[in-house]
Image (cartoon, rainbow, N blue to C red):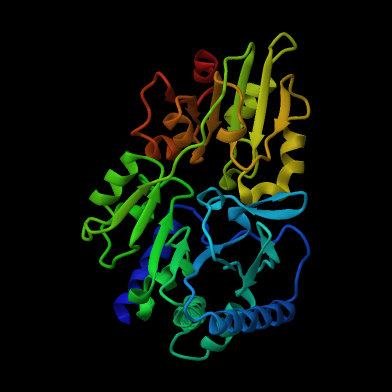
Amino acid sequence: MDNEIQYVLRVQRELKNFNISEVDSTDQGKAYSNFYKICIAIRDLFSLVTLLTLNRSKKFNFIYSGEGLCYKVDGKYRDRILEDMALENLIYINRGRDTIITSVNGIKMYNIGGGVKLLSFIFKFTNKKQLSTYFAYKTINGFILRLANNPDVYSLLYYNLNGLSLVFLKQKSKFKLIEVQHGTIINFPTYAKPSEIKIADVFYVKNQETIKYLKEHLNKNFQEINYKLLPYPKSEAVDKKGKYILYASTVEFNGIHPVFLEYLNQLNKDNDITVFIRLHPREKDKIGLFKNQVKDTRAKIIFDESKNWLESNQIKNLIVVSPWSSVIEDAADNGYKAIILEELGKNRFAYLIDNKKVIFADSLEKILVFI
């Protein structure tokens, strides 16, 4: 138990030192009381227990997701990460403690956040108070998966409290734990050190370089782990007259990076430039801030709200710009030029920077030369 606690605390400390919040995205719609969240969790857990009890022999695919890992189409949630894998017998579980999602892809989603809040409060009066939320997730997930028949469990990131609870479940040998890459893995702190415990049975990742990195870092002590590549969407993009830029935001900047904003503000009416702005999932509610920042620019501004920018993009000569979004890696993998604006991004994507297709630009002058 002590080793488990120390491991969880270390991972949380690494995230904090990296200035990355572990907290799930907050609900961008209605605000719910804790009492209501608890009632919804009890209802959904009862429904899920009934489903699993009546289907003891059926094999399910459990997907732990949340608002930040989904996108909305006509007000309805779609799966942003796993939809294209065409999995069957799905059970979606909303790990978010402050969100309630009724369904994803038309499939019911079971909300456990209220139950986590209730148990976390109770554990604060026990010897589990140091990591009360973690143990709340572990208790609920252990209860659910104990009833399932050798399921495949998709955890989209192991390093939050829900993901870590799945890693340390006693009945882990009774299910296959699968991690699916949703951001950048290479040089991200929670993947950098060899783990003393096997994180997952299978890793779905974007490229061979990431497989190599995992084998030499996080999974160094567990060479039997299986790796599979996530296919990128097939592109039908063509060269188009003019200049086109995709700006991918990052939460930590609370708006557009000042160097890129300086670039936008110096444009004149003769510049034929279109800028697509793609907001981080946790910044969807800040669209007003971004619109206000670019209201005076001479560039044509379009907010990209598509499920996947690679899938929707039709412009081959597109340039991707971001402080350190994982969109940089997607761009490099698919042959697009990219500009990294922040020192943290420079360090994180050092393996991609070649000063030809991918550059680090911390000044307006460097951006102007590249674009």
Q: Which residue is at a point 71% across and 21% down the rendered structure image?
A: 299
Q: What x and y, as percent, mark residue 67?
A: 63, 58
- Which residue is farthest top? 270
Indicate left or right for 233 with 295 as reference: left
Placement of the C terminus among the 4 image quadrants: top right
Q: Which quarter of the figure is the N terminus placed in?
A: bottom left
Whole-percent x and y of residue 46?
63, 84
Label total for image: 0
Most extreme residue toward the bottom, as rendered? 126
* Residue 207 falls left or right of residue 71: left
| Quarter location, residue 315 | top right
Q: Is residue 186 above or below residue 260?
A: below
Residue name at image x 48 percent, y 49 percent: 182
Viewer can see residue 316: yes
| Residue 109 position in % (x across, y down) | 64, 67
Q: Quick check: 289 above or below 297?
A: below
In-front residue for pair 86/45: 86
177 over 266 or under it: above or below: below
- Residue in the image at 67% along x and 17% along y: 273
User: Which residue is drawn at the image coordinates 47% and 47% (left, top)?
Assistant: 183
Residue 321 picture location, percent across and down = 54, 29
**254 up-or-down from 53: above or below:** above
Q: Which one is in front, 305 or 291?
A: 305
- Regarding residue 5, the answer to whether it shows in the image is no
Q: Is residue 311 left or right of residue 329?
A: right
Foreground residue among 9 and 53 = 53
